[in-house]
Every structure is written in structure tokens, then in C-alpha cells.
Amino acid sequence: MNDHLSTPRDRRHRAVPLLVAGGFIAGGVGVASASASAQTAPTSSYVVLLGDAPVATYDGEQPGLAPTMVDAGERLDATSEPVQDYVQFLDEEQLDVLDRVGIDDSARGQVYTYALNGFEAELTPQQAIDLANQPDVMSVSPNEYRQLETYNTPSFLGIDQPGAAWDIGYTGTDVVIGVIDTGIWPEHESFADDGSYAPLDGFADLPCEFGNAAYNPDDAPFECNNKLLGARDMRTKYIEEVGPETFYSARDYNGHGTHVAGTAAGNAVMGDVGGFELGELSGVAPDARVIAYSACGDWGCVVSDLLEAIDTAVADGVDVINYSIGGEPSLNGPDDIAFLNAAAANVWTATSAGNSGPGGGTVGGPATVPWVTSVGASTHDRSFVSTASLGDGTSVSGASITAGTPSRLPLVDAADFGNELCNPAVRFDPGIEDAIVLCWRGEIARVDKSLAVAQQGGAGMILANVADGDTLDIDAHMIPSVHVDAESGIHVADYIAAAGDDAVALLGDAAPAPSQGSVMAGFSSRGENDAAPDIIKPDITAPGVNIMAGTSPFQSIGPAGELYSPMSGTSMSSPHVAGVFAVLREANPDWTAAMAKSAVMTTARQDVTKEDAATQADPFDMGAGHIDPSGSPSADGSLFNPGLVYDADYTDYRAFLCEAAPGTFPDDWATCNWLIDLGYSTSPTDLNVPSIGVSSVDGPVTVQRAVTSVADETLTFDAVVDAPQGYLVDVSPSQIELAPGESATFDIEITPPRGQSGDWQFGSLSWVSGDFDVSSPIAVRAV
């Protein structure tokens, strides 16, 4: 790799097959050591995690090595002597474990020491088993792939209103957001340093990995600044296996990472798409700083690269991570554990819930773990709309961000021309030239449908949904286009069938219009949580439909050359929460990650509907509700001043894993018994999260929680219960009085109705004192 792309990490490049699926080899498997023949067997890429704590959670148990854990409100300092000494210790330990089983040091690739203690390695299957048998090895797992899972949404959130957070100066100033994604377009005005950003201590020498013009002339050199503090190309394993693709640097090859970073922390700018003026666009935390970690390519994101990105972000000292990436449901995968340790280093993480809705049980990892804040996607209250006027005097309206057609044009149904889905790989039968084409949603990317029409001579497109509840999406189409619902699509098709060759339509220019906000997107993944059914997921919902933000001119969705684009997905809702985290961290720098998660959940609003825009959403749709940073930050009950928080630390999560995922750590037996002796509950239902889930209520069940006062005066709170239908819920004590900083533990006894089983029921528990209303969702299932 060229010098200007290098990082402090030790990177080795080998062309070997990467396992893209597979299981997990726990420590202690009883298999003989590797034979000589096994040593010459084909190798594959594995991720090896060791049991000793990484820097983020090391408490000083090794003789002569000082603790490296950070206190709440502090950033990890990777340059400190204790940290460097312990990193050297972990490095030597990793090499030693390889040596013990006869594996050469050269097999070790990427190295993790901050958020994880482990490495990526090229191993034979037998070597992988031999390593897993070592008592200090936590896990050996095949390297896998993960997949990438603002028009002004700050106004919809209310964060920019008079008297709200921005107005009194909470804009994310000096908070650093690490965006692990597809890289960034560094010249974008969303990340320009306008001179208002002062240098930030500890971030002066970060790599700024752009400018590999020898590989791609469009990769211009760029010098990072006080807004975009740095950018790293983390695609070590991906490049070995697939290649660098469009850019051999941290430059964004498809727009996703730029869009995510801009949504979270982009400057306030004036945007346009194809000359269509969008007005002012802003990130949720416009004065936050950004470090970009390019970890994904066209085929997805390799786990070992993602781990290196998380590990490096913790070492860099970021305050918040956005991770719009997901995989299968899990609790103890390598990235799950990396985020557990990142939380211990006081890094607050927002992650996308997934785009596999609206079916239940579709939330993917790492959104399934309780130490990150997982985000569903819902609508906001502004859209762009166009109308298709038909020749019979009727019309249909839908989402659009294109100019209209200059006059009435022939209107045809793609299904009548052999290409119902408007697939670019399929030729239309002759006859769509200079016509508006009715295309049907499904299988092919929406913008590729308009591309297919344009390439074969069509002049416009009406794109119709095929199912009720599907979102209407604003896309930067190649030709005048409007996206309509299924009922409207059928109406247009019926008109074409009746009118035949006389069918005509006129597409109007797109224009801003109000729309119904807080409607769950049909694609947004839902609970129950397949990895931990007692933990309600997602945690929260935020805008994720038709989000306008900056993009790369090499974007994969929409016309090339554009610098702004609408996108939809939980990838877009997650950075809204990351931005709120940045603003919240500026206001409450001493809080822990769990306290921040508690604040956004317990102050959420519940006026959210399912994707039908009418039925009340439940906690498996929206988690605790819709994030709400509106109003005065100092107001009682605001997100910034919630009154009470549910806090949890690394030890609480370790106790949770004792029963939820036994055997995750090599020392689980001793550690779990020690935690039980100290009074910790290992029942997953007792983990101190700001939601209450019990997946198996087979009689009266008691759940325990604790709250800590973050109010500025002594207050008395009363428990208010909205019990799930048919259940009895008793809270004891039902009243608590707490001075600032004091905590109280309480029990929640849940009694199921007789004869009811199988179905989840939902309710809530609130602690109320004046304007403070600390609300938690309840989800219970009788068995």
C-alpha cells in the first residue's frame, strides 16, 4: 500500500479465500493438535479473540501494568504510557498464543487491542481448532461479511426551534463522531472548515487517506481540517480479497458514508438535486467533528475490517460511533464484543436496526445487543410531491424530486412490453419511445428502473408499489418520475387498459409538500429480539425515509455528479440518533453510554403509527418511541434533563451474558459465580435497561430495575403503570424519593392472565414527578 494510505496498524496482504459464512468455534474443543499434513492444508481468514481485557476494560490486574479503563466523561488517551505499555503486553500475548500451537507470526494480520484483544489470522481449520483449545482464547470465528443496512429533519425533530438545543448553543461543539461506513467525500461543503472550528487537542495527527490518483485520477489529494479531523481506509481484508474497486483510499465510492456523516454532523448548507433547490440542509449536530472510517466495498463489509475500524475509533478517542451496518442476530459476535468494550471506554454507539421489516424477529446484529442504541426508521413531515394527470381527467400523486414532462405524452404499461419490472438487463418490446412508462416496484433498484426506461427511449416513469404499506421514496431519477402507492398504480394500469393507444399523461414538476410524519417504514426491522428475547428491540425510532443529505458524485443510487441525494433506510435513521448523542454529550459530558441511551428512550414520544399510517405502533415496531430532542434542554422531562436514568456498566453486561450467552468468555464460570456472590442478577430480564421485557411469563414473575437521579433537586417519583392487556403489574416500592445522584432499586411483579399464552402484549411503566415522565415500554409473553 502507498505510504499516504498507511496507518499505524501492522497490515499484511495475502490473496487467500475469505469465509463469508460459518459458525463459531468456542474455546475448549477437545481435538488433537495440528498434524504436519494439516499445516499444509488450505487456509482461510479467522477472527481470534483472547480472554484478557482490551485497553478499554483493563482494570490493572497484571503486575506492573497500570489500569487503562477510563472514567465516565473521559476520552481514552491512546498515547498515554499506561495504554502503550498494556498494548505491548497484549501484542506479546497474541504472538505467544500463536507460538504455543506452532503457528508462525506471519499468519497474524489485523491486530485489535483497544476495543478487543485479538487479531485476524490466516489459519487452516485444524489450526483454528488448536487455537480455540487454548485456555486464554475466547473465540475463533470465520471472518464474514456484514452489509450496509437530511430536506431538513432537524426541524421535524424540533432541535432547531426557538429555545431548543441549537438556540441555546448545544450543537455538538467539539464532540467527535466516528462514522464507520463507505468513506467520505472530503471536499463536500457539509464537512468544510469555515474557520469557526478551533483545533481540537489530541486529534492533530490523524491520517487523512486521500489522493491515490495513481490508482484513480479522480482521487484528488485532500488535507483534513478542523471539521473533518481524519479519514482512514480500513479495508485491509476486503482489498486483499476483492480489490480496492473505485478508490484505493478513504474516498466514498457510493455516497452512503457521506450521506450518513452529513446527517449526523454536516454543516448547514444549501442543497440541490439536478438543479432542484432543496433549501437548507443540516446535520443534527452541525458543529460536531467527524472522523471517517472506510470499511466497506460493493460486496459489503468484512468483519475483521469492521473490528479494526471499531478498535481504531476507540483508540482515536471518538465520543460517538455511527454504525449503519448489520448482520445476523447475535450477542457475542466479535463486533458485539467490540461495542461492549467501546461502551466501557465511554463511546456512545448508534446502529441501524435493519431493513428486513415489516415482519417480526428481523432485527440483526449488532443492533440486538443491549449496550448499543438500535434505531428503527420512520417518516418525517416533509416530502416532495408530483402529480401525474391522466387523459381521462383523473390524477394520481406521489413522491418525486424531478421536473415534469413538458407536455402530455403517450402512457404505457411496462407489463405490456415484456419488462414489467423495468429491468435494465431486459429489452422492452418496441413502443416505449417518447412515452411515460408505468413500472412496477420489486427486485430492481428504483433508480435502475428509470435508467432502463431512459436508456430505451422512454421520456418519463410512474413507479407503482405492489403492496400496501410500502414506502413512497424520493429518488434522483434519470427522467421525470413519480412514485405512487399500489392503489394508484392499479388505477393507472386500469386507465391504460381502457384507453389503449389513446392513453396519455402529464407529469408535473415536483414541489415541497407536508406529509404524515412518525409512520414506521415498511422496511424497518422489528422485534422480537431473536438473539435475546427479553431485550426489546429496536430501542428507538427516528427519521429514515426520504432523508436529504450530501453524497458522493460517484453515488451508486442516482445520477453521477450530484452532491446531494435522498436516501431511505435504517442506515439513515441511525445517524439522527448519533447526532442527538453528540448534542447530548455536549450538554452532559459526564454521562455514560447507558445513561445517554436511557435519556433518549425514556423521553421518547409514542405518537407513532405502523406502516399503515393508522394503527398505533408497538414496542417491537418503534422501541420506546420516537426520539424527541425538542423543547428547552433545561425543561423538566426533556431529553437533556430526563430526571431519572437507567444506568448499566461493563459488569452489568457481563452478568447479563452469563445466562443470555453462556461461555462467551473463557473465565465465565469463575466470573459469573463471583458476580452472583456480589449480588448481581444474571437473569436477562433483570439487566438494567430502560425497557422491560419478559419472554416467558409462566406465573408471577418479578423483574428488578434501578434508577439514578440526574435532576438538580430532591424529587419524589410515583410509579404509573399501563399494564399489558390481561396482566397485573405491581411496582414495589411504588414511590421513591431521590436527591441528585442518588439511586433506588425497585421490583416489578408481573402476573399473567389465566389461560393466555403465546402472544406478546405491551404496556408501559412511568416514573412521574411534576413534568418529569420517565417512561419505559413493557413487552410480555405468557407461556
Image (tube, helix red, strand yellow):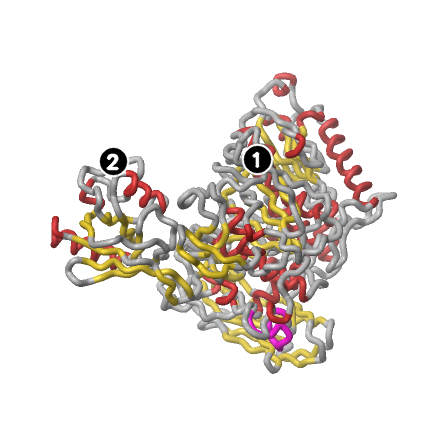
Identify the secondary structure beneath mark 2. Answer: loop
Magenta: main secondary structure equals: loop
- The front one of 308 and 782 is 308
Q: Nearer the viewer, residue 427 or 279?
A: 279
* Residue at x-position 37% and y-position 57%: 471
Q: Amino acid at mark 2?
A: Arg
Q: Is residue 634 located in the magenta-colored stretch of the structure?
A: yes
Q: Dot 2, crowdedness within 10 Å: few (<14), some or many (≥20)?
A: some
**Residue beneath disc 2:** 427
**Element at badge 1?**
loop
Per the image, is 569 magenta? no
- Compute the Cα span from label 2 to label 1: 40 Å
Position of residue 302 relative to residue 340, above or below, is above
Q: Would you place residue 119 above or below residue 173 in this image?
A: above
Question: In the drawing, what numbered circle is on residue 297?
Answer: none
Label 1 sits on residue: 143
Left or right of 201? Residue 463 is left
Of pointers 2 and 1, the one earlier in the residue sequence: 1
x%, y% of residue 618?
45, 65
Say whether residue 331 is left or right of residue 442: right
Q: Position of residue 333 (x, y in %)?
A: 59, 44
Is residue 197 depicted above or below 712 in this figure? above
Q: Which residues are magenta?
A: 630-640
